[in-house]
Amino acid sequence: MSKEEQAGAMRGTRAFDAYLVAAVRAGDRRAAKGLVERWQPRLTGHAHRLLGEAEAARDCVQAGWVEIWRSLPRLREERAFGTFAYRIVSRQCAQHVSRVVKRRSLAEELAAEPLPEPVMPVAGSDAEKLSAAMAALPGAMRAAVALFYTAEMSVAEVAVALDIPVGTVKSRLSHARAHLRAAFEGDV
């Protein structure tokens, strides 16, 4: 698919989201179900990348949907639903992490959880190497890379979705690229 075709598909996707948001605002329950069906897998994957725990990710996404429905009337641009939803789920994940950190002292956490060693397959395809290298990235970098490359968001959209400054997104992407490059060159 060419860049022009991808851009057209993305515009069509955003237009459909805008339609669904407008229908939800008008009280259409089927449109609400449609939004959930379209966005649940993406939001759950995003939360899982941030948290690294499937159960916590599902809980944060569920809490995120409550906030999405509550905040939907304040969404100014219906076509920005995806960024809006990612931002809310990112906040839920951040709140989850804050709660976890409050329950444990920093010293106990550092002692119990040493830094993971990157795992690189001895033999295998480039896809396996990339997957292993991505898994070795810290959660914040992994989330930025996934939104930028997989979800094809702009740097500004990633910043809004993760609720961080644009400069931080650029820094995370730059550091992630360096980690991935090192992994492919065997420096990790």
Image (tube, grey):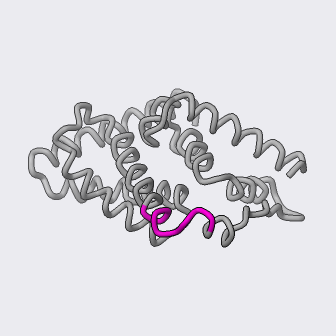
Q: Position of residue 82 (x, y in %)?
A: 37, 43
For the point 46% across and 42% down, the residue is 162
**Which quadrant would the N terminus be assigned to in this image?**
top right
For the point 56% across and 48% down, the residue is 143
Examine the residues drawn in magenta and state their main secondary structure.
helix
Magenta-highlighted residues: 99-107
Q: Position of residue 109 (x, y in %)?
A: 61, 67
In front here: 82 or 6?
A: 82
Q: Is residue 60 left or right of residue 120?
A: left
Q: Is residue 102 above or below residue 166?
A: below
Q: Is residue 104 above or below residue 98?
A: below
Q: Position of residue 124 (x, y in %)?
A: 84, 62
For the point 16% across and 45% down, the residue is 23
Q: Position of residue 155 (x, y in %)?
A: 53, 31
Q: Is residue 177 left or right of residue 105?
A: right
Check residue 77 for magenta coloring.
no
In front here: 28 or 50?
A: 50
